[in-house]
Amino acid sequence: MRRPIIVGNWKMQKTVPEAVALVEALNAVLTDVHEVDIGVAPPFTALAAVAEALRFSEIVLVAQNMHWEPRGAFTGEISAPMLTDVGCRRVIIGHSERRQLLGETDETVNKKLHAALGSTLDPILCIGETLEQREGNATFRVLEQQVRGGLAGVAGEAMRRVVIAYEPVWAIGTGKTATPEQAQEVHAFLRNLVTTLYGKTLAEDLRIQYGGSVNAGNIQTLMAQPDVDGALVGGASLEAASFARIVSFQS
Ligand code: PGA
């Protein structure tokens, strides 16, 4: 059985006081949820304060991005050692907003993935097709390229630490969720692909999150799909009550 993993991606939202208030509210309402891995990914500026607020919590601190070099002259960038230093345990890599708006490519995604795996950060590798690609029947080809490109050179042992997040670009922030059947179809495809690349045992253990307009109303049917193992949640993770309802989908 794969343990569900649900992460809130706050994107460029929340000041430090707002971020602390949100995790304090989550800590208070989520004391009974133990069968799900829960993470929050605040903006960099709030990581230290949120880490402090999560000191006695099961909620894990996640970074939204990182650079592949450990240090150096890279103005505006943040490295893996800096993220682990502040208490991050995971990092989101290759989010579609970074691919679409900030020049991220499979090559930079791959470099970041290797750097994360060389540190103690467990990566969440994001992949997803655009609406144009879906309508042009290119979905599986695009996803295969993103998986192969993102994971190039990653050995089986390290792969055990990777989570894949399938986030169709057309479903992010649009209120248009993939149907549970659409999500399942892609997740099954991805698990098959990982079986080809890493073998059946690893593929069976791999957790694949769905992301794109996940909310308290659709989480249950998504999680009921056999190959959907969790969610990466944007908008609906910004309020304690709605994120708490999402991570409590089993109750
Ligand atoms: P959304 O974002 O839930 O607001 O669609 C998901 C994501 O980008 O991870």
Image (spheres, rainbow, N blue to C red):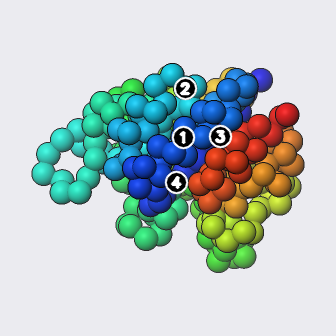
Q: Is residue 94 left or right of residue 44?
A: right
Residue 107 position, x and y percent, is 38, 54
Q: Considering only order in the chain, which callout, 1 or 3, is on the residue closer to the N terminus?
A: 3
Tell me the distance, in whole angstroms, between the alpha carbons under discs 4 and 2. Answer: 18 Å
Q: Cβ–Cβ below 8 Å for labels 4 and 2?
A: no
Residue kind at label 1, given as amino acid type: Val
| Callout 1: SS | helix
Residue 6: mark: 3
Q: Considering only order in the chain, which callout, 2 or 4, is on the residue closer to the N terminus?
A: 4
Q: Is residue 224 left or right of residue 100?
A: right
Q: What residue sits right under mark 1 in the picture?
A: 23
Q: Cβ–Cβ below 8 Å for labels 4 and 3?
A: no
Residue 10: mark: 4
Query: How many other residues sit within 10 Å of disc 4, few (<14), some (14-19) or many (≥20)?
Result: many
Q: What residue sits right under mark 2 in the picture?
A: 57
Tell me the distance, in whole angstroms, between the alpha carbons under discs 1 and 2. Answer: 9 Å
Q: Residue at x 39, y 50 (%)?
A: 16
Q: Cβ–Cβ below 8 Å for labels 1 and 2?
A: yes
Residue 41 position, x and y percent, is 49, 45
Residue kind at label 2, given as amino acid type: Ser
Q: Residue at x 70, y 42 (%)?
A: 244
Q: Residue at x 51, y 22 (%)?
A: 56
Residue kind at label 4, given as amino acid type: Trp
Tell me if residue 185 comes above or below residue 49 in the rendering.
below
Residue 76 position, x and y percent, is 23, 57
Tell me if residue 1 comes above or below residue 53 in the rendering.
above
Tell me if residue 236 comes above or below residue 136 in the rendering.
above
Q: Considering only order in the chain, which callout, 3 or 2, is on the residue closer to the N terminus?
A: 3
Residue 52: mark: none
Tell me the distance, in whole angstroms, between the alpha carbons under discs 4 and 3. Answer: 13 Å
